[in-house]
Image (cartoon, rainbow, N blue to C red):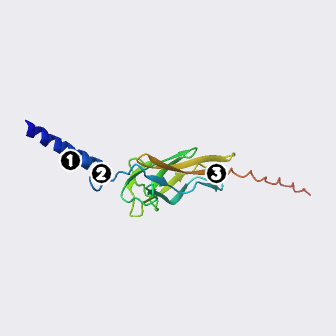
Amino acid sequence: MKRYRIGLLGVLLLMAVVGCGGGGGSDRAPLDAQITGPKDSSTTIAAPGGGDLIYKDLVFRVKNAALQPIPGVEISFVAGSVNMEGSGITDRNKNLLNPKDARFYKTTTDESGAAIMSLLILLPLSTKEEQEGTAFVTASVGSAEATWTTEITVQKLPDAVATPTPTPVPTP
């Protein structure tokens, strides 16, 4: 019975060491992970609007407390928009990276600790009023996250051009 307890204790201790150490090759971020993303932006779209707008190569970087890149960790992206027709995470060629849910994507960082994606936004058509909206991408690694936001303005339709009233032609 004593050997059984010592053996069981040894197995439990080994499992704890392997579990806490990440098992060599874990894609989980360390506790001190930090994430940075692109600077926020704003865009004005001329009337009539509509169609789509793509922000290419949004780069999010994951680093540790010593500011060293962390390659191979899992990173999640969530995209959304307010007052826009919709948005989705794509590659540079507007191909959805997750066709089942265009607003969510999960990948791993490259050798430089970076993950790159693009955001496709469907724009509303112009109206008689200027339309403003926001689109965003939040990237998260472990308990760290960073959000990139863009403010989008679709200009109003220009006022109708007055058509001249025809001058009556005098009759002889």
Given the image, on which type of amino acid does mark 3 rest?
Val
Residue at 51 percent of width and 60 percent of height = 56
Q: What element carries label 1?
A: helix
**Count of marks overlaid on the render:** 3
In this view, the residue in front, 56 or 163, is 56
Whole-angstrom CA distance, mark 1 to mark 3, is 60 Å
Tag in front: 1 or 2: 1
Q: Residue 22, which numbered label?
A: 2
Which label number is shown at residue 14? 1
User: Which mark identifies residue 154?
Assistant: 3
As shown in the figure, which amino acid type bears the numbered disc 1?
Leu
Residue farthest toward the top in the current orientation of the protein: 1
Q: Tell me whether the residue at label 3 lies in contact with that at label 2, contact meaning CB atoms closer than 8 angstroms.
A: no
| Dot 2 alpha-carbon crowd within 10 angstroms: few under 14, some 14 to 19, many 20 or more | few
Nearer-the-camera pick, 28 or 78: 28
Q: Where is residue 71 in the image (x, y as percent from the top left)?
A: 38, 60
**Quarter of the picture holding the N terminus:** top left
Crowding at label 1, few (<14), some or many (≥20) Cα neighbours within 10 Å?
few
Q: How far apart are marks 3 and 2 (CA)?
A: 48 Å
Q: At label 2, which amino acid type do we have?
A: Gly
Q: Position of residue 172 (x, y in %)?
A: 92, 58
